[in-house]
Image (cartoon, rainbow, N blue to C red):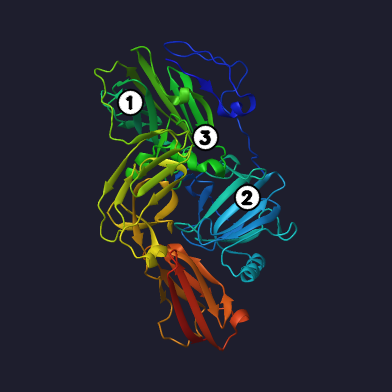
Amino acid sequence: MRLKFCSFRILYMIKRIVKREITGWFLFILTGLNLFSQTSFPKNDFSSPIDFQIFLSANFAEIRPNHFHSGIDIKTKGRSGENVRSVADGRIVRINVSPTGFGRALYIEHPNGYTSVYGHMHKFTPEIEKYVKENQYKRKSFTVTLYPSKDKFKVKKGELIGYSGNSGSSAGPHVHFEIRDTRNQHPTNPLLYGFDITDNIRPVLKSVYFYPLGDQSSIQGLPEKKRVLLSGDKGKYRLKNDSVVTFSGTLGIGIETYDLLNGVRNRCGIYSIEAKVDDKSYYYFELNEFSFAETRYINSHIDYEEIVRKKRKIHKIFIDPNNRLRFYEAILNRGHLHFDDEKVHAVKLIVKDSYKNTSTLSFNVQSKPASHALSKNKDYLMVMPYDRESHYELNGFEIKVPAFALYDSIKFRLTVAPPIDGSYSKVYHVHDETTPVQTSFTLKIRPENIADSLHSKLLFAGLDKRNDVFARGGEYKNGYVEMKNREFGIYFVSIDTVPPSIYPVNFKRGTTDLSNRKYLRFTIKDDFSGISKYKGVIDGKWALFEYDPKYNRLQYNLDKDKIGKGKNHDLELKVTDQKNNVKVYRMKFKW
C-alpha cells in the first residue's frame, strides 16, 4: 500500500511534511509533532443567553443543505417571547432584519476577541426596536443591515437584548446562538465554552458505507457502493453480518452517525471522527470552527447522493481532490485504502461528540484481485476535469463549467426528451442531480415557438420527484434563456405571465371599519417564479410591511404615530414576481 501523509493546517505553515512510504502498509514518524489539534476555548467568560436550562434542538456544524450549521439551536419551550440576554459585556456591532436567514438577529462584540450572535428573534428591546424602525423608514425597506456607532448600544453580561422568536428561515421557535472569532468571523463550536449543557450519551452509529474508488475497483465483486447496517451497544459497534468486507482496487469508507444529548430526542451532529487501519491513524477531523467561505464544501464531505435520494447523512472518510475544508487534521492518501497484499486488515472508526463521549466501530477488510475485468461505463459525452474549464454545445443547448466548480472529475451525461406541456424547448436532463457543484456553471437553452413579446417572461423550469414543475430562474438573452446555477438536473424553458395573489387574512375583503384591529395581515403568493418585491403605501406614504415568506404573510402593524388614529385611510399594496408580473390591492379603511 502506498499512502501519503499531510496535515492540511500544517501545510499552511510549512508547505510540506516529511514522509516515508513503504510497500505493503505504511509507516510515518512525526517526532515532537502533535498529530491532532488541541484548540482551547475560554470556559468561564460567557453566561447563558436564556433564563432556563439549555436544551438543544441542533448543535454546531450539523449537516444542513449546502452548509454546516454555524451555531447551536436552543429550545424555547416551543414558544416565542422568552428573554434573550447578552452572554458577556460588549457592544452591539450589527443588527440584521430579513425575511430569510437569521431573521431578526443581533451581533455583539466582546473584549475577549469573540462575537456572539443571536438569531430568529421575535423582537429586540424597545431602544433597539426604535433604532431599527427609524432606519427601516429612512431606507424604505423592511430588510436592513445596520452597523450602530461604537458607543450606541453597550451591553453588560446578562443584560436583556430581546425576545426569542421564529423569524427568518426558521422551522420553529428557538434561539440560534453562535460564538464567532471576531478577527475573521469564523463560527466556532459553542459547546466548547463551558455552557451548562448535559450530555453523557455516546454517538449513535447506524450504518457504514463502502465505496469502490476508481473504474477498476469493486466491493465484494460489484462495482457499486455497499451499505451495511450495524449492531452493538454501549458505544461498541460491529457489522450486522460480522463478515470480512472484501474489495478489489481502492476502497473508501463512509459512516452514518448522529449524536444525542440528555433531555431531548433531536438527532444532532458529531464532533470528530478518526479512522485507523491496523491501529494506525489514517484520517481525522474535528469540528472546532470553519469559515463561511468554505461551508458549501460540505457537499464534498458528505455522500451527496445519499442525502438527495434517501436523506441519509453520511460522513465520507475520504477526500475529493477539490475538497478545500480545513478541519481535516490528518489524512493519509486522501483516505483512499489500497493494499498490495491479501491479508485481513482491521479497521476501526472512532466517533466522538463535543463532550468526548465515544463510540467505535470495528470490522475487517481484505483486498483481493478482481475476478474479471470490470465493464467501463461508456454512457457519457465527455470527461469534465474538476481543475479545468469544460464546455459542451448541442443544437440549442450550451453548458460551461468553470475550473474547480466540481469536487472531482465527472463523466458528463446529457439526455434530451421532447417538449412537455407548458414547455418552450426540449427537456434536457443535465448530468445527474445527485452530483454536487461548488460554484456556478452557465447554462443556455434556445426557446422554441414563442412570440417575441413574451421573451421577458421566459425562465428555466425543472421537474421534482413527483414530476411537478418548479421554477429554476434565468432570463432571456440573445436568443437563449440563460442562467448561472449550482445544480445539475432537469431543465427546460417555461413561462410565467401570471401575477401574484393578495388576500386579506384578519378582515374580510370590502371591510372598511378596522378600528378594532392591531394590524393588517395579508397572504401573498406567486404560483411559479416567486415573489420578487412588494411595496405598501398608506395615504401616499411608504408603510412598513413585514414579510414572512414561510407563511406567505405580509403584515402592517397599525401605528398611530405614522397614520393617526380615528381617521380614514387609503392603502395600496403592490406585489411583483420574479418575471415582473404585478398585482395591486387597493382599499379604503377607517382606523
Q: As displayed, is residue 515 above or below residue 81? A: below
How far across and how far down the image is residue 17, in percent?
58, 20
**For marks 2 and 1 on the same chain, the one whose residue lies earlier in the sequence:** 2
Residue in the image at 29% along x and 15% along y: 369
Circle 2: element type = strand
Q: Which amino acid type is shown beneath numbered disc 2?
A: Ser
Q: As displayed, is residue 150 above or below residue 509? A: above
Quadrant of the image containing the N terminus: top left
Q: Nearer the viewer, mark 3 or mark 2?
A: 3
| Residue 78: assigned label | none
Residue in the image at 56% along x and 25% along y: 7
Q: As displayed, is residue 460 above or below residue 263? A: below
Closer to the camera in the image, 563 or 357: 563
Q: Which amino acid type is shown beneath numbered disc 1?
A: Asp
Q: Is residue 315 visible?
A: yes
| Residue 116: assigned label | 2
**For marks 1 and 3 on the same chain, the one whose residue lies earlier in the sequence:** 1
Q: Is residue 312 visible?
A: no
From the viewer's perspective, tell me whether residue 384 is left or right of residue 518.
left
Closer to the camera in the image, 336 or 508: 336
Residue annotated with mark 3:
324
Residue annotated with mark 1:
215
Q: Nearer the viewer, mark 2 or mark 1?
A: 1
- Give residue 147's quadrant in the image: bottom right
From the viewer's perspective, tell me whether residue 206 is left or right of residue 11.
left
Q: Residues within 10 Å of mark 1 (few under 14, many from 20)?
A: some
Q: CA distance from mark 1 to mark 3?
A: 24 Å
How far across and how far down the image is residue 87, in percent?
64, 51
